Amino acid sequence: MKLSVTVNGEQQEWEVEPRQTLLDVLRDRGYTGAKRVCESGECGACAVIVDGLAVDSCIQLAMQADGCSITTVEGLESNGELHPVQAAFAENGAIQCGFCIPGMVVTAANYLEENPDPTEDEIRHVLVGNLCRCTGYKKPVEAVLQAARGERSE
Amino acid sequence: MKSQLSVVGHRARRVDGVKLATGRGTFTDDIHIRGLLHAKLLKSPHAHARIISIDTSEAEALPGVRAVITHENVPRIPYTSAGQSWPEPSPYDMYVLDRKVRFIGDAVAAVAAETPEIAERATQLIRVEYEPLPAVLDFHDAMNDGAPLIHDETESYGIYDPAHNVAAHIDVEHGDVARGLAEADIVVENEFFVQYQQHTCLEPHVTIALFDEDRRLVLRTSTQIPYHCRRMIAFALEIPVKDVHVIKPRVGGGFGNKQEVVTEPISAVLAMRTGRPVKLEYTRLEEFTIARNRHPQHIRLSTGIRRDGTILANSLNVLTNTGPYGTHALTVTGNTGTKPLPLYRSPNVKFYADIVYTNLPIAGAFRGYGAPQGFFAMEVQMDEVAEAAGMDPLEFRKLNHIRQGDTDLMSAAAGEGAGKKARVIHSSGLPECIERGAAAIGWHEKRGKPGDGPIKRGVGMAILMQGSGVAGDELAAATIRMNEDASFNLHVGSADIGTGSDTTLCQIAAEVLGVSIEDIVIRSGNTDDITFDYGAYASSTAYITGTCVLKAAEDARNQIVNQAARMLQEDPEGLLVHEGAVRSLSGKSVTLQEIALECLYGEDKTVVIGKGTHATKESPPPFVAMFVEVEVDTETGQVRPVEVVSAVDVGKALNPDICEGQVEGAVAQGLGYALTEEIQVGPDGQVLNPSFMDYKIFCAADMPRLTTILVEAEEPTGPFGAKSVAEIAINGPAPAVSNAIYDAVGIRLHSLPMTAEKVLAALEEKQQS
C-alpha cells in the first residue's frame, strides 16, 4: 500500500505492507532513533509525534499515519540547534545507556508545547509511559524542568 | 594535585550525550546490512525432556528459509555462557543446541530466513518428538535422593556434584562459629527468601554475525565483555581466536545480563552455515523468559553477640537456585557471603552454600552479583540483632562495622578471589556516610514515630560494601595516540554499556595530557584495536581501566615532554604539561600542536603512542549508608517509599554527575527488587508475567525523593583516589525498606518482594498474636 506522510518536514511516499507498524516502517527507512523494546506499547521507547500527539509507534499500524505529519527524535533539532529538551538531557547527566532517551525526549518536547510551565509532579506523570532502567528518573525529570525554564526565559 | 584538577572531578558533559539525545547513538540494530538474514528460535514447551527426533524437512522447504540448525548438525562442545576470565569458574554445562531441554524456552532449533516472519513460521514447521522427564520445579527438592538429574550427560564438566544437581558449593569458616554461638549472650536466627529479578535492559540481547572479506567472524553484539566473548566463541565453535572480531556498538543497558554470551553462538553458527549476515535479536518475551535473572535464594543467618552488642559469631547458610545452567553459579553466591560478612567484625565467621540446578529460568550475573541477596538478609538481621541487644540499629552498626586498616579475610577464602591475598581496607568513608546520611534523613527525629491514622511512617537503614573489580582477576590495556591538531585517539577494551565509562576515561586522559575532554576521541570495546579488557562487570572500569588509561596517558605525556625538551632545549624534569602546552620553569613554552607537528613531520620523526596495561591484586570496597523513609498503608498493605538517602564513599568522584546517576539508577532497580519485581513461575515451570504490564519496574511517578551524598575517602590504589560506584547502591533498598516498615508498623518482612499482600498478611498475623 502507498503511505503518504510528512516526516520531519519532508514529504514521503512509501510502499508499505498493511501489517507493518509505524515503528518498523520508520526504522527500515533509517529513522532509527525510535527504539524497539517491548512491541506492546508499555515502555515508550518508540515514541514519535504524529499530528502533534506523542504516540507509541510500535502499536500503531503505519497506514494509520497516512496523511499525517510525523516528527521523530531526529527531527527535533532546528537550524542545527538542539531542541532545549535534547540540550538539557545532554548537559545534565540525564542520559546513561540512551536507549529510552529518544522516546523520553520526544514525549517531553511534545508535552512542553502543551504545558510550557510544568511542575516536577506533572513531568513525572507525563513520563510514566517512558520506562528507563538506568537513571532512576531524577536527572531526566530535572532536565525537562530545566528545558522548560530555559524556554521561558528566552 | 588534588586541588589542581581541571577535568577529573568535574561534571563534564558526557562524550556521547548529544548523539544519544538526538537519536544518533548507533546501537547494534541501528545499521543497515545488505543481505541480512533473520534468526528465530524453536523453544521447548517442556521443563525437562529428551529430544527423541527432530524433522526439519518442512521448515527447510519453506521459501526464504536459508538454514535450520538442531543438535544433530551443530558441534556439541560444552561451554559456559558466563563471561569471566579463563578458565571460567562456572561449569561447562551448555551446548549451542542439545539433545535435552532443561527448562521451558530452552532452544531446540534455530532458523535463518529472509524475513523474521518466515523464520518464525519455519520454527513452527519443525516437528519434534519429546520424551518428557520428571522435573525439579522447587529448588529445595533439587538435592533430594532420587531427584531428576538435570545434567546426566557425561560431557559436561566443572559441575560440583552432578549426581545431586549441585552446580557449585562453598564451605568456609574462620574461627569456630559453633563455639562463638555457644558463648554468646544472645543468639538471633532468621530465614530469608529472595526471588527471580529480571534485568529488563531496554535494549534486548542482539547480535549480528557475519564473515568478512577475510573469512573472519565479525560479531556486532550488545555485550559487556567483548574480549571474553571473542575467546569464548572461538572456544565454543572451535575456531582460532584470531578469526573472531567482536565489535561492541552502543549498548542499551547490561546490568550483568550481557556479561554472558547469549545470542552470539547461534547467530555465528547460522552465519557460518549460510555465508550471509545473520541477526538474532531476542523479543521482550524472550528477554523475560530465556535470558538471565537474579538468583533466587533461601538464606539462613545465625548471629551471636555479647550483651554489650559486640558480635561473637556470624554464620550464613545459602541455598541458591541457578536454574538449568550454572552460569556464574559459584561466583554470584560467593558474593552473597563475601560482601556482607566482612562488613561486620566478628572473630568467628562461617559461610556455607549449595548452588543447585532446577528446571526453572536461568539465573546469572545481575548488578550487585549475589550481594543484594546477602545484604537483604544481613542488614535485616543486624537490625534484629541490634533490637535484641537493646541498641539503636545505627549505633549497633557503628560499633561493629569494618574499619580502615582491617583485613577482610573472606575475600581470600571464597568466591572469585579464592586462594588469593586477603584484602586490607586502605580507605573507608563509612563513618562519614553514616553520619551525613542519618542527618539528611532525620534519623533521630523520625525513628519510632509512626504517627496516627491508617498510614504509618517509618525510617530504616542499611550499610553496604562492594568491590572495585575482582581482586587479582582483572586486566586492561589501552593505547593513546597524538594527532596533528593535538587531539588524541584513545582506545580502550572496556565496554561502556551506558555507565558513562567512556566519558570518565576521557576525563582521566585529558587531565593527564593537559587538554580538554573534547580533545579526546575514544573508541571502546573493539577486539581488533590494540587493547584488552576483561569487560564491564564487578564495578571494574573506573578503577581498573581508569588506572590503565592513567598509565597510557602518562606514557604519552612523557614522550611529549621529551620532545618538548628537545624543542625548548630544556631539561625534561622541569617541564609541565598544562592547558595545551608544555612550559618550562624559565618561562619558555611550546604548544602541543607544535610538538605534534614536529613529531609527525619534523627532523626526528616519531608517533606519540602511549600505552598502558594494568592488573592488580586490590579491590578496594566502596561503602554506602542508605536511609529510607516509607509510608505503610495499614488498610491496604501498600508500601510507598518517600525518600531514599544514599551516602556513598566512592573514593574520588571522577565525574559527580555520573556517580550520582549510577547510585540513583541502582536505587530504582533496588526499590523494584524490594517492592514490586518478581519473575513468577507456574507449577509447570512456565514464566507467568513476561511483559512490562505484568512485571512492574518503577516508573518516574513511583520514585521517591532521591538524595545522593558523595563522600570522598581517597583510595591510595585508585586513579585520582577513585573506587567503584556502579553496583553497590542496588544492595540497599531491600533491607532499608524492610527495616523502615518495621519502624512504621512493627512487622519483620523476610521475603522479597514486599508486596501489599505480604504486608497485610503480616499485619494480620501480628494483630492475632
Image: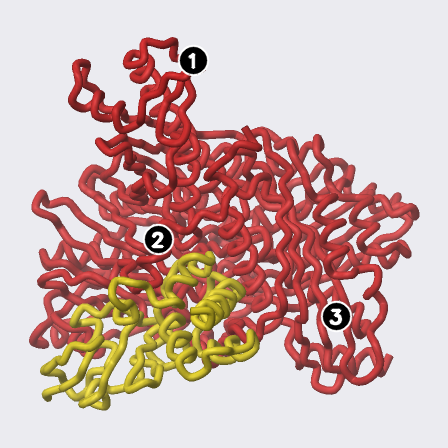
The residue lying toward the viewer, choosing from A95 and B103, is A95
Labels 1 and 2: the sequence-earlier one: 2
Res. B16 mark:
2
Q: What's the residue at 91%, 46% (across, down)?
A: B308
Q: Residues within 10 Å of mark 2 (few under 14, many from 20)?
A: many
The quarter in which the N terminus of chain B is drawn is top right
The image position of residue A101, as x and y in percent, is 38, 66
Which chain has been coloured yellow in this picture?
A: A
**Circle 1 — which element?**
loop
**Drawing shade for chain B:** red
Residue at the image point whose x is 58% and y is 37% from the top: B620
Whichever of labels 2 and 3 marks the residue nearer the N terminus, that label is 2
Residue B433 lies left or right of residue A59; in this view the side is: right
Disc 2: host chain = B
The residue wearing badge 3 is B741
Disc 1 or disc 3, which is closer to the eye?
1
Question: Which residue: 31% across, 35% down?
Answer: B531
The numbered mark 3 sits on a residue in which chain?
B
What amino acid does circle 1 point to?
Answer: Ser
Towards the viewer: A110 or B248: A110
The residue pinned by badge 1 equals: B586
Circle 3 residues within 10 Å: few <14, some 14–19, many ≥20: many
Say if residue B198 shows up in the picture.
no
Mark 2: which secondary structure? loop
